[in-house]
Image (cartoon, rainbow, N blue to C red):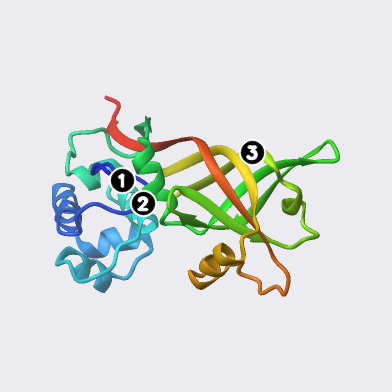
Amino acid sequence: MDNETAGTRLPDMVDIPRNIRRRREQLGMTRAQVCARAGLPPKWLVDLEIGDAPLTRATLGILAAALKTNVGALMSGAFDAPEAGVPDTRSLIAMSEKECYARLATHEVGRLAGNLHHTPWVLPVNYVLDGNEIVFTTDPDSPLAHVRGTTAFEVDDVDRYARLGWSVLVVGVVEPVTDPVEIARLTEAGAGTWPARREELWLRIHPGRVTGRRLRPGPARR
């Protein structure tokens, strides 16, 4: 996977605190002034600037607004962009199949689309990757139990504060898993559903097409 992992993790936590401090000093603002704007405790910003405090994507978005800049600038250190009120540009980047699988491996819940009695539905399902295939279990009475043939499975991650995110779409064929040895192996690996059930149906998606896109921050418009 390349280093443009917008929506999955923050860049180097050495660079970001340095960029935050540089931007604050560029504006001639004290830590207290920044924290008053952001609604954050001043002691936390002191610790952050020396690399001793955690930073989430949501908090980074709040800090960007308080520092009259954007998330992309705080991540890159490029502060020659317009200040508050002018949104930074974003671009959708197509992900390779390898990157799609890497992101699928970081999550446990996706959405499966199907059709029952001529009524379309989309339901959440917790899953695991078994090689390049997606495995999940369901209750015999669930609409998921009737899924067969080609279907669509989607997983995404969105941070609305930082305006970062990604999505992966898997189009493949669903088949039941009936081999007791295979079921025992999957059970041992912890592939069962979150709610405990006495009777579970095991299903496997054999991917035919795996595509994904991520939202990459870009420099602000001039």
On the image, the x and y values in percent for residue 185 come to: 51, 67
Q: Compute the Cα span from label 3 to label 1.
A: 28 Å
Between the residue at mark 2 and the residue at mark 3, the CA separation in whole angstroms equals 26 Å
Give the left or right position of residue 130, taking residue 23 as reference. right
Q: Amino acid at mark 1?
A: Thr
Q: Position of residue 16 (x, y in %)?
A: 20, 54
Q: Secondary structure at mark 1?
A: loop
The numbered dot on residue 152 is: none
Q: Quadrant of residue 13?
A: bottom left
| C-beta proximity under 8 Å, tags 3 and 1 | no
Image quadrant in which the C terminus is located = top left
Indicate left or right for 138 with 135 as reference.
right
Q: CA distance from mark 2 to mark 1?
A: 6 Å
Task: Mark 2: give few (<14), some (14-19) or many (20+) Cα within 10 Å.
Answer: some
Q: Which quadrant would the N terminus be assigned to in this image?
A: top left
The answer to the question of whether label 2 and label 1 lie on touching residues, with beta carbons closer than 8 A, is: yes
Q: At 38% across and 31% down in the image, what residue appears?
A: 94
Q: In the rendered view, does 56 fall on the left or right side of 123? A: left
Q: Amino acid at mark 3?
A: Thr
Residue that carries the numbered disc 1 in the rendered image = 5
Asked whether 152 or 52 is in front, the reply is 152
SS of the residue under disc 2: loop
Q: Is residue 20 above or below residue 218?
A: below
Above or below, 209 relative to 65: above
Q: Position of residue 111 (x, y in %)?
A: 61, 48
On residue 151, which mark appears?
Answer: 3
Q: Which residue is mark 2?
A: 8
Report the mark closest to the observer, 2 or 3. Answer: 3
